[in-house]
Image (cartoon, rainbow, N blue to C red):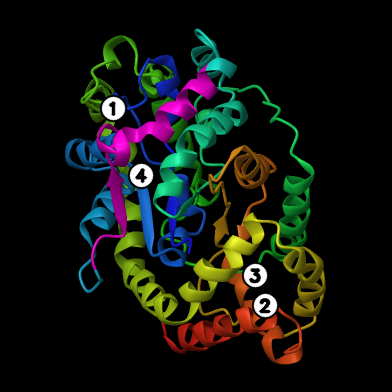
Amino acid sequence: MINGVYLPGWEYNRILGTDPRTPRNSALPGRVLWNGGALFWMFENVYCTKESLENEKYAAKRIRWTSSIIFKELSGGLPGGDGPIIHEVDWSNLPGGGAELVEAHEIVQEKNPGRKVRELIDVGDDAALELINYDLIAPVADRLNSIVAGTLTSFRNWFPATDGVPEPPSVKAQRINDMLALIARPVDEAQARNGVRLLRPPSQWSDEMEERQKRVRAEVEEPFIRDLCAGEGEYSDPSRGFVPYIDRAATRIADYRVVDEPWENDWTSRKESLLRLREAASRHLWPTLHGDWIPALLRNDPVAVAEFPRYVSSALRSRRIAPWLNLNTRVVFGSLAAGSASIVGASSLIGHAALVQDIAAISGTLASLAMASPDRPLAPNVAPLALFYQEAFKEKR
């Protein structure tokens, strides 16, 4: 059963230290909120490193960034919900003393000795840093029956970055890559409008909003972001290193408000839909998605590999998803850490091939195949998805 997803932050900076259990700066990936938000209803539990959430809570209080407020609310539980959606994980207090994490740290550190990680931060090599994140976070996620979300770093927001080249995937990983690409491609091309867009994406900002965000990034973020993400210099305090950065950003609240005010309206109007989807997913979608579908993809199940192309082809000829929801749900699956093969196969591959998928559309289209092909092994696993969408589409926004 894989019922959780781990949101990576800047955990790669722990390679710069001697013990990965020692606290260091981190933060949560805001783009997960405007790339659909499906992670928050698709998975029963969403995890993050303790320091990531502490950073967001301080930013919510000090500067009232909407994304930080949302993360704080999701960690406390939304009114009418069934409790916290985001759960923090304290790396200094892991089961068994975090032996698996320490071992993973040693392996990754050997591959990236000395100041290599700082060099990757300085040039903004998102791809290489994500690979490091996956390898380090994987054993923690595995303990939590979770996968690691991918393609969430964003150094390109601040300065031109190099095009990092991920390690070549294994044959097993390539098969997973090909299968997910087959699923994702028609959805992206069709620009399907499904999922819960919790916040309008930067592509929909006005010219004024975009210009002011560029200016504030250049003046109070970009000059300091490297040290912040590395947890060095004035940001080296193990528990409060993010404070100087947030305090400096707070001097430009007026610039941030041009984005945060519309985002607050987005969040207020859409959080109820998120709860409705979670409730429906918990009864119809989660048992199959968590217990059968995702594990099959990650272990390279031969039936899944053989049958998915046919299911996708048939799904494209089936009825389209009803436009009950309001935007592309873009989710990239990362790794389930059972060993190096699964790490590469499910994280470096999926995240760094930028296989952004609208899982809501994928699930819905596959659902129509349950009746069409009951003799195929995967069909029973798809059937509950149809029940989920039937219920979801009954609700009105």
Asked if the residues shown at circle 1 and circle 3 are in contact, with their CB atoms under 8 angstroms apart, the answer is no
Name the residue nearer the viewer: 313 or 223.
Answer: 313
Query: Which three-letter amino acid code belongs to the residue tagged 2?
Result: Thr
Task: Give the foreground label among 3 and 4.
Answer: 4
Q: Label 3 to label 2, Cα distance in Å?
A: 5 Å
Query: Which three-letter amino acid code belongs to the residue tagged 3?
Result: Ile
Residue picked out by circle 2: 365
Q: Label 3 to label 4, Cα distance in Å?
A: 26 Å
Residue picked out by circle 3: 362
Left or right of 6 in this view: 250: left
Query: Magenta part of the protein: which range?
Result: 83-109
Residue picked out by circle 1: 249
Above or below, 310 against 49 in this view is below
- Residue 380 bears which disc, if any? none
Asked if the residues shown at circle 2 and circle 4 are in contact, with their CB atoms under 8 angstroms apart, the answer is no
Residue at x 50%, y 7% (from the top left corner) = 114
Task: Give the foreground label among 1 and 4.
Answer: 4
Task: Assess whether residue 86 is covered by the magenta stretch.
Answer: yes
Task: Assess whether residue 137 is covered by the magenta stretch.
Answer: no
Residue picked out by circle 4: 48
